[in-house]
């Protein structure tokens, strides 16, 4: 069975050697690191899941902050320093403040933070962890993906189209819209999941599958992202790249999105 997900796809596109370490050589469980931006992203997603969930009826900032406090306590040990934790804590509060000051805080989602799959063919499975699905009064479904990074760079429309394929495939949803929701205050960025868009997404996925199956070398693609690669210790090209940017970090060298 060949499997693809937005995460696998983005790793393959970013660096084939990294894909090889993770999915072919399967070194991830052994070498996986607790990156602070991942901890933060997980905490914010857990907070929003509870805040927008059916059991919570208080949609103000005080309630959101109280939930963040609880979820933070579960993960804070992963931060490597007090300064780092404070920086992310402030970012978390700012994002919740923004959310609670707009209509996004009043959403009544039908599905939150769940992993689903669909089969493009009998031996090609597509997986995706979907942050949120809202269903409107006419049965139309609206997909939302939260972005918790500092900037809005790096959002790939294909991610949302994959979710639309999954929801309209196995789950037979009528997907009418899909959006990234940037919690840094930039708000929504819509992606149209029309028929032509979904056809293009399928073609991209089949082309990527062909690329992966034909790949033999899995060459490294060193970049500033090597700094946050779990496999840096195994990878001479990555270590060289990290050394090369040290002390001269470009302003776009932000940590990846969670
Ligand atoms: S360290 Fe860099 S070049 Fe090496 S596998 Fe990781 S991302 Fe690729």
Image: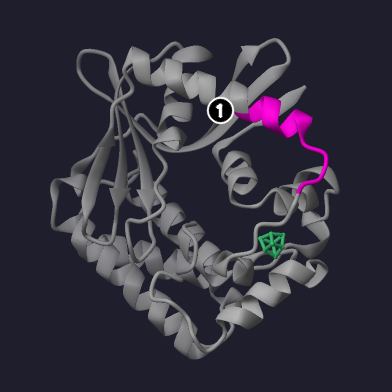
Above or below: residue 241 compared with residue 54: below
Q: Quadrant of residue 149?
A: bottom left
Residue at 21% x, 13% y is 138
Q: Residue at x 28, y 64 (%)?
A: 95
Q: How is the image coloured?
A: one colour
Identity of the residue furthest to the right in this view: 25
Could you tell me residue 214's position as x and y percent? 77, 30
Q: At 55% across and 38% down in the image, what residue appears?
A: 6
Closer to the camera, 193 or 210? Answer: 210
Magenta-colored stretch includes residue 229 = no
Instruction: Using residue 113 as the reference point, say whether residue 9 is left or right of it.
Output: right
Quarter-wise, where is residue 233 in the image?
bottom right
Q: How many marks?
A: 1
Instruction: Ligand 1: give its quadrant.
Output: bottom right
Q: Quick one: SS at disc 1? A: strand
Residue 197 image-quadrant placement: top left
Residue tagged 1:
116
Q: Is residue 58 visible from the viewing direction of this image?
A: no
From the top left corner, tell me how far across and down residue 24 is, in percent: 82, 43
Q: Is residue 28 visible?
A: yes
Q: Where is 166 relative to 40, above or below?
A: above
**Span of residues in magenta:** 208-218
Looking at the picture, how far across and down is residue 247, in whole percent?
52, 89
Is 212 a magenta residue? Answer: yes
In the depicted view, which residue is nearer to us: 228 or 182? Answer: 228
What residue is drawn where x is 42% and y is 24%?
A: 164
For this rendering, which residue is in front, 125 or 221?
221
Q: Say if 191 sits above or below 122 in the image.
A: below
Depth check: 124 or 93 in front? 124
Q: Quadrant of the N terminus?
A: top right
Does the magenta stretch mainly form a helix, a strand or a loop? helix
């Amino acid at each position: 069975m060949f499997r693809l997900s937005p995460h696998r796809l983005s790793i393959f596109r970013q660096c084939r050697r990294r894909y090889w370490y993770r999915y072919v050589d399967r070194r991830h469980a052994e070498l996986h690191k607790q990156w602070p931006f991942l901890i933060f992203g997980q905490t914010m997603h857990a907070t929003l899941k509870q805040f927008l969930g059916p059991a919570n009826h208080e949609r103000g900032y005080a309630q959101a902050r109280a939930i963040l406090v609880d979820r933070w306590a579960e993960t804070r040990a992963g931060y490597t320093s007090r300064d780092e934790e404070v920086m992310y804590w402030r970012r978390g509060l700012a994002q919740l403040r923004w959310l609670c000051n707009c209509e996004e805080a009043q959403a009544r989602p039908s599905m939150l933070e769940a992993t689903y799959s669909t089969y493009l063919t009998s031996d090609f499975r597509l997986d995706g962890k979907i942050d949120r699905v809202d269903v409107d009064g006419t049965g139309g479904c609206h997909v939302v993906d939260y972005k918790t990074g500092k900037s809005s760079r790096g959002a790939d429309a294909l991610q949302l189209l994959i979710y639309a394929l999954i929801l309209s495939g196995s789950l037979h949803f009528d997907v009418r819209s899909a959006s990234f929701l940037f919690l840094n205050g930039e708000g929504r960025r819509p992606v149209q999941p029309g028929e032509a868009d979904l056809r293009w997404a399928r073609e991209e996925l089949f082309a990527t599958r062909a690329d992966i199956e034909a790949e033999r070398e899995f060459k490294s693609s060193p970049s500033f992202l090597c700094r946050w690669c779990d496999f840096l210790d195994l990878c001479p090209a990555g270590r060289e790249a990290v050394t090369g940017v040290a002390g001269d970090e470009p302003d776009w060298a932000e940590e990846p999105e969670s």
